[in-house]
Amino acid sequence: YIHTGESKLKGIKEYVSYLIDNKQKFLLFFHHIPIANVLEDYIKTISNNKKNFYMRIDGQTKPKDRQNNVDLFQNDNNC
């Protein structure tokens, strides 16, 4: 299954670049953590490591932080 995710990386990166270039707010959902890690690294690179440019919510995110991040994403136009 991981190979399915890997085979889609090129297209996902192109689409993410398009969204970022056009200042679009977006969500990405992943089944495989390694693929999420690759995309997170890619987003960091193309956003020049801007700290507040993206947020990651996964199984390691504490419940309180998860809700705060969801609220921020939903309510802050600059997020």
Image: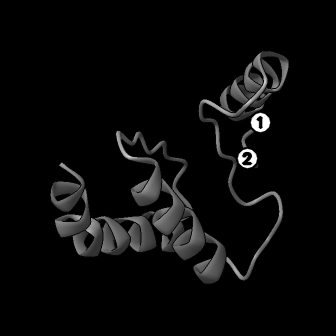
User: Residue 48, percent across and down?
Assistant: 72, 82
Secondary element type, mark 2 = loop
* Image quarter of residue 29: top left
Please name the amino acid that badge 2 sits on: Cys
Kindly check if marks 2 and 1 are in contact, taking CB atoms under 8 A apart as contact.
yes
Which residue appears at 25% of the width and 66% of the height? Answer: 6
* Image quarter of residue 3: bottom left
Which residue appears at 60% of the width and 30% of the height? Answer: 59
In this rendering, the answer to whether 73 lies above or below 11 is above
Secondary element type, mark 1 = loop
Which residue in the structure is indicated by mark 2? Answer: 79
User: Residue 78, percent across and down?
Assistant: 76, 49
Q: Residues within 10 Å of mark 1 (few under 14, many from 20)?
A: few
The colouring scheme, among rainbow, by chain, secondary structure or one colour, is: one colour
Please name the amino acid that badge 1 sits on: Asp
Which residue appears at 65% of the width and 45% of the height? Answer: 56
Q: Is residue 20 left or right of residue 6?
A: right
In this rendering, the answer to whether 12 lies above or below 26 is below
Q: CA distance from mark 2 to mark 1?
A: 5 Å
Give the camera-side residue of 64 and 77: 64
* Image quarter of residue 40: bottom right
Which residue appears at 84% of the width and 17% of the height? Answer: 64
User: Residue 65, percent across and down?
Assistant: 82, 26
Q: Which mark is residue 76?
A: 1
Q: Is residue 53 left or right of residue 19?
A: right
